[in-house]
Amino acid sequence: MSVAERQAEIVAEFTGMTDWKARYRRIIEIGRALPPLAEEFQTESFKVKGCQSQVWLHARQENGLVFFAATSDSDIVRGLVALVVKAYSGASPDEVLAQPPSFIDQIGLGESLTQARANGLSAMVKQVKLYGVAFKSLNTPR
């Protein structure tokens, strides 16, 4: 499944929800369903810079695809990073780099999050894109 298709699934899930309390509850539920991140990746080197809450994001490449794992010490932020992981995990580095996080604006997160959380979400996406750059450079013949 492509990043665009996964983002469309996220948008479809939230489209019917007009109440932001319901949306936030769903975001928290999604975060709670996120598989645990191994302790070895909950270190300073995997911490996302620019987040008010603590967020750790790990990436690995397998068969040319990038897989992300993450967690946070905040329920809502864990849900936000879970959405980012859901959108981009399993994509090629090229696709990670090519696809903007359009689901964020399509479900209204950009305007409903506090400035600190919006900045944190932006930092998470930036980190995902940096992993895309790193893995693409590893795959480029020299």
Image (cartoon, grey):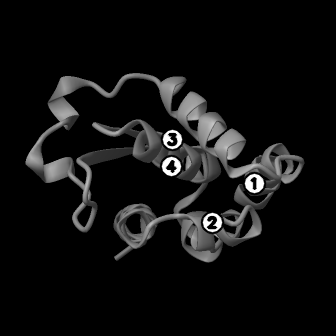
Q: Quadrant of the C terminus?
A: bottom left
Do tag 3 and tag 1 residues touch (Cβ < 8 Å)? no
- Nearer-the-camera pick, 32 or 46: 32
Do tag 3 and tag 2 residues touch (Cβ < 8 Å)? no
- Tag 1 secondary structure: loop
Q: What's the residue type where badge 2 is placed?
A: Glu
Classify residue 107 as left or right of residue 100. Answer: right
Residue 65, compared with residue 95, is above or below; it is above
Return the mark for residue 32: none
Q: CA distance from mark 2 to mark 1?
A: 8 Å
Disc 1 crowd, CA 10 A, few/some/many (<14, 14-19, 20+): some
Do tag 4 and tag 3 residues touch (Cβ < 8 Å)? yes
Classify residue 51 as left or right of residue 6. Answer: left
**Which badge, 3 or 2, is on the more N-terminal residue?**
3
Q: Is residue 67 in view from this perspective?
A: no
Q: CA distance from mark 4 to mark 3?
A: 4 Å
- Tag 3 secondary structure: helix
Task: Write down the residue under mark 3.
Answer: 79
**Which badge, 1 or 4, is on the more N-terminal residue?**
1
Q: CA distance from mark 2 to mark 4?
A: 20 Å
Return the mark for residue 2: 1
Do tag 2 and tag 1 residues touch (Cβ < 8 Å)? yes
Q: Residue 31: give x, y in percent of width and height.
A: 50, 33
Q: Residue at x 60, y 43 (%)?
A: 24
